[in-house]
Amino acid sequence: MEIGVVALSLSCMDFTEMLEFVRDIGGTTIELCTVKGAHNGTVNLGKDHRSELVEAVESRGLSIVSVAGYNNFVCLEESELEREVVRLEWYCELASDLGVGIVRAMTGDPHPDLSQEEMVDSIIRGFRLAVQVARKHNVVLALENHGHVVNDGQTLLKIINGVSDHHLRLTIDTGNFCWAGHSVEDAHRFIRHLVPHTANVHLKDLIFAEKEAVQFVPLGQGKIDLKMTIEQLAAEGYNGALLCEYEGMGDPKDLLGAGTFTRDRFVKGLKRGTRESLTHLETLL
């Protein structure tokens, strides 16, 4: 398995600075961040600039294993779902142009006018449309356990089984289950059950701070059984990447905006936590 970084976690760094840092700490691949203005506006995702983007990555000995896609399939109307599928297709086309086979996908945010069952049904309908787009661009959609609507193993399996198409698989984020309120034991159980459907992996570690709030820490310094996770993946024949996503510094927009950290101090902390994470990950492999 390759090791690398979810570039979103380093998106406050310039793009080439981020690439060189990942290379220097032993990473070989990234999940491409696609948030508007990320990397201080130093990466251009426009169609005419995609060959330049690939060259920038490959010239530093790295690859792009997945593209971060965004969509909201928690919708009241079918027309809304169709618009969100069009939105997701942009990321599929981007991945195809870059020669990348995986698009990390989302489900959506809670809707006050829909029950949990109705939200999950809407997500399934959305992905039944989206897999047709994924097939067209020869990519796999890897649904992440993100947010509060689908952040448990049973719901994720219901979606995978409800769509029943090999163009929809999962991105497992090892820290998000606890972030959503589940115990470490439940998180480990979910991971074991979901590994057979996994195409992409975000590795986080955590401790519980005051009032049981989740605090993310470098890999190997928290409560997530990363060794078990990797062993389960290996047993299922997973040959994708293991991507570190260190978020222990907090939200850069909030902290930098409030003046809690200078940019240099914030980036220094991100680098330290990410470096420690990849060092630990190498020991597990």
Image (spheres, rainbow, N blue to C red):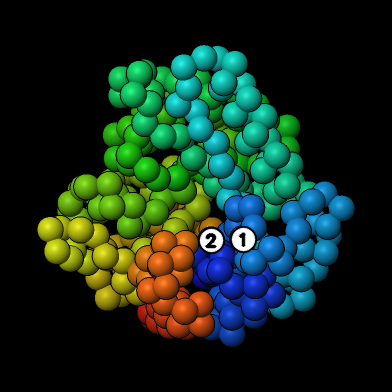
**In the rendered view, does 65 fall on the left or right side of 183?**
right
Which numbered disc, 1 or 2, marks the residue closer to the eye? 1
Give the residue at mark 1.
Answer: 38
Residue 160 visible in the shown view: yes
Q: Are marks 1 and 2 in contact (CB under 8 Å)?
A: yes
Q: Distance between the residues labelled 1 and 2?
A: 8 Å
Give the residue at mark 2.
Answer: 8
**Which quarter of the image is occupied by the C terminus?**
bottom left
Residue at x 18%, y 63% (from the top left corner): 208
Residue at x 69%, y 75% (from the top left corner): 16
Q: Where residue 117 appears, x then y in whole percent? A: 32, 20
Find residue 117 and name its label: none
Q: Where residue 114 appears, x then y in whole percent? A: 35, 19
Residue 284 visible in the shown view: no
Instruction: Tell which circle, 1 or 2, labels the residue nearer the N-terminal end.
Output: 2
Q: Label 2 amino acid?
A: Leu
The residue carrying pointer 1 sits among few (fewer than 14), some (14 to 19) or many (20 or more) residues within 10 Å by Cα, namely some
Q: How many marks?
A: 2
Q: Where residue 166 appears, x then y in whole percent? A: 55, 34
Splitting the image into 4 quarters, where does residue 130 fall?
top right
* Mark 2 element type: helix
Whether residue 151 is situated above or below residue 55 in the rendered picture: above
Looking at this view, name the residue that lies furthest to the right.
48
Q: Label 1 amino acid?
A: Ala
Whether residue 79 is situated above or below residue 73 in the rendered picture: above
